[in-house]
Image (cartoon, grey):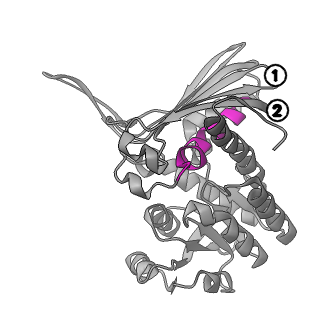
Amino acid sequence: MTFHLKPVRVGLIGAGRMGSFHAENLAWRVPGAILAAVADPQPGAAEALTNKLGVAKAYSDLHALLQDPDIEAVAIAAPARTHAEWVIAAAKAGKHVFCEKPMAVTLDEADRAIAAAKAAGVVLQVGFNRRFDSGFAAAIAAVKAGENGTTQLSRSLTRDPGLHDPSRIPQWTIFLETLIHDFDTLLHFNPGAKPVEVYALADALVRPDFKDKGLLDTSVVTIRFDNGAIATAEANFQAVYGYDVRGEVFGSKGMLQAGHININNCVRYHQDGIAIETSRMDSDLLREAYVAEMAEFARCIRSGETPRATGEDARNALEIALACIDSVQQQQPIKLGGR
């Protein structure tokens, strides 16, 4: 589908690392969209980013951006625990919403965010970028088309490249912000099935000295579905070899694998052995996926299509993440469906 008329004018909320990356994509790389404004409460943060990118409007008052009639849509990259309130505020202001994951950290927040978007008639898309990666997208499409048969086993993993400052990581981040991607992936590796039981093990193995402060940096989660399928998700905050994101789904007709760690396809053969350059940032490994998800957001605003990563998808993944927290606290499997 080609774009007609003017591109969608997007205002960015949050000028931190991920917000700055989204800003660059909107300003330079996303077809059908343009970065029209940036808002961040940190003094000078919005101005620094808009000056760099040649964007006219910078706000320190986030509500002022929402009241700007020139802004059609917002991209929310504020701290994760504030996402739901900004989704709701943006929807009430009549703005279409792209929200980085997690969309919410409680099911009540998720329900209110979804309801606000529906009441306002605006697009609500959540930043589950893996679904826009070519490998993961192909695997999910193949599963949905029945090419892999009935899903029996699946796995998804996230290994971040480095744990730099544990003191800045909020409690339960490993489930709410890291493994939330894997939960979304596993749900789409087994379409139509419902998770019925979750069991999570987690510890601070990278930085055990921060465990008493609430840090969990390593986890394995088992999910059982109502069709009998079993899925596992794992995460670690320090893979010294790079940023590692992979998935696998085994079905009655075969197996599908997705994800890689290579920064390019060059393999070096030399006197010390064989070497491959690896990605060290999510914004490198999944760069094309980040652009594609934002392009879909703009396209859905213009076309009226439903984005592939919806508020309901965010709620479904969040339900598993919250069950993981309960499982760790109670040291036992958690039944789903009664939350």
Residue 65, horizontal then vertical, whole percent: 61, 82
Callout 1, which amino acid? Asn
User: As displayed, is residue 237 above or below residue 95?
Assistant: above
Residue position marked by numbered label 1 in the rendering = 227
Tell which of 243 and 262 is nearer to you. 243
User: Is residue 191 covered in magenta?
Assistant: yes
Q: Which mark is residue 179?
A: none
- Classify 10 Å Cα crowding around label 1: few (below 14), some (14-19), many (20 and above): some
Q: Judge from the rendering whether residue 293 lies leftward or rightward of residue 253; answer left or right.
A: left
Residue 174, horizontal then vertical, whole percent: 53, 44
Tell which of 6 and 59 is nearer to you. 59
Indicate the quadrant where residue 311 lies. bottom right
- Classify 10 Å Cα crowding around label 2: few (below 14), some (14-19), many (20 and above): few
Q: Which circle, 1 or 2, is nearer the viewer?
A: 1
Residue 3 makes an appearance in the image: no
User: As displayed, is residue 140 above or below residue 80?
Assistant: above
Residue position marked by numbered label 2 in the rendering = 192
Q: CA distance from mark 1 to mark 2?
A: 9 Å
Tell which of 79 and 142 is nearer to you. 79
Residue 143, horizontal then vertical, whole percent: 71, 27
Q: Residue at x 44, y 38 (%)?
A: 204
- Please name the predominant secondary structure of the magenta segment in the image: helix
User: As displayed, is residue 295 above or below residue 187?
Assistant: below
User: Which secondary structure, mark 1?
Assistant: loop
Residue 239, horizontal then vertical, whole percent: 37, 36
* Segment tinted magenta in the rendering: 171-192
Q: Residue at x 53, y 51 (%)?
A: 171
Indicate the quadrant where residue 327 lies. top right
